[in-house]
Image: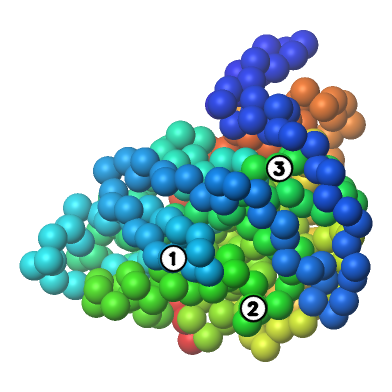
Amino acid sequence: MLNWKGRGVVLGLAGLMLLQASPSRSADAVCSADGTPPIQTVKPTTVRPICKQGSLLSFDQEGVRRYACLNLPPKAQGKAADGKWPLLIYLHGSITTPDSLYKEGKALFDLHNQYPLSSDPATKGFIILSPEGRRATPYASTGPQTGTGFHWDEWYRNPTENLDVKAVDHFLDEVVATGKVDPRRIYVFGWSNGAYMTELYGTWRSDRIAAVAQYAGANPWTRDPCPVTFSYTRKVPLFLMRNLCDALVPCSTTSAWIETLQQQDWPFAYQSLSLKGDAVPSSSACAKDCSKARGLFEHVRWPKTAVLTEMLDFLKQHPLP
């Protein structure tokens, strides 16, 4: 994590990776109704995550080994566990991996053991499924660059052919097949690049996904270099957490997303965050003194536990119809 020092920033692992990522050298994309062509991967395309206190899932997808971490709450562990638990799919940010859940996302990880996301008061905790993206090079004109590293292909907006979407489908099916998942309470939460992918996945799989939450993300349909039409079959409820200073997802970008959602009469709520990740009034203005150092710090540090609990409260109120 990053530690704010007033005049500068001391970068932790994720922040250092963001700054040291190789710059994008991919050619400009040829746009179509699906946005860009599929993202250009690099080897090694995936790396086995550690999956702290959880189990590793994997399968082969067109010659690439795809991975995911699965963390069960205590009462859901073991073959003899009786009951069904809500499931939260976590989509990590660019450059990071599912293991970011146990580092930057530790506050959320700690909540999964006890938070009552179910409608049944006797069911404590929830399952977290954390798939891994692929190492790839984004197209040259995608805006703020994090370079070659782990990404979700949010730019190729084909819901049936996108390999990252199909990988999430596979892992979701595998976990549901255990019989431990409450099918009316499957949610998706994503950070940064994963936040953009979260909105796409929730919209494309609206028959399965009850509600979604984004941290440091915005409208995936307007993303450069190939914006496409915002289309949907169901308005999947959304909880948005945004920074008032963010070097990679500017406050003005999240403000535009909020305006779009309001115009669409979307079922959503949003929470603005202070420098350290605490809740501030949602109507707070974007920061005027938004330096690059501060913007990187805010993008990498996560919301505080109270805000994440507010997010879970919102998701709990929106089971699948």
Q: Amino acid at mark 2?
A: Glu
Using a 10 Å C-alpha cutoff, classify the residue at mark 1 as few (fewer than 14 neighbours), some (14 to 19) or many (20 or more).
Answer: few
Residue 79 at what x, y percent from top left? 12, 66
The N terminus: image quadrant: top right
- Comparing 139 with 259, the one in front is 139
* Secondary element type, mark 1: strand
Left or right, 24 with respect to 191, comes to right
Residue at 58% across, 65% down: 164
Q: For residue 161, which numbered disc appears in the image?
A: 2
Q: CA distance from mark 3 to mark 1?
A: 22 Å
Left or right, 310 with respect to 239, comes to left
The residue wearing badge 3 is: 148
Q: Is residue 250 above or below residue 199?
A: above
- Foreground mark, 1 or 2, reads 1
Residue at 24% across, 77% down: 179
The residue wearing badge 1 is: 60
Residue 280, by quadrant, is top right
The mark nearer the N terminus, 3 or 1, is 1
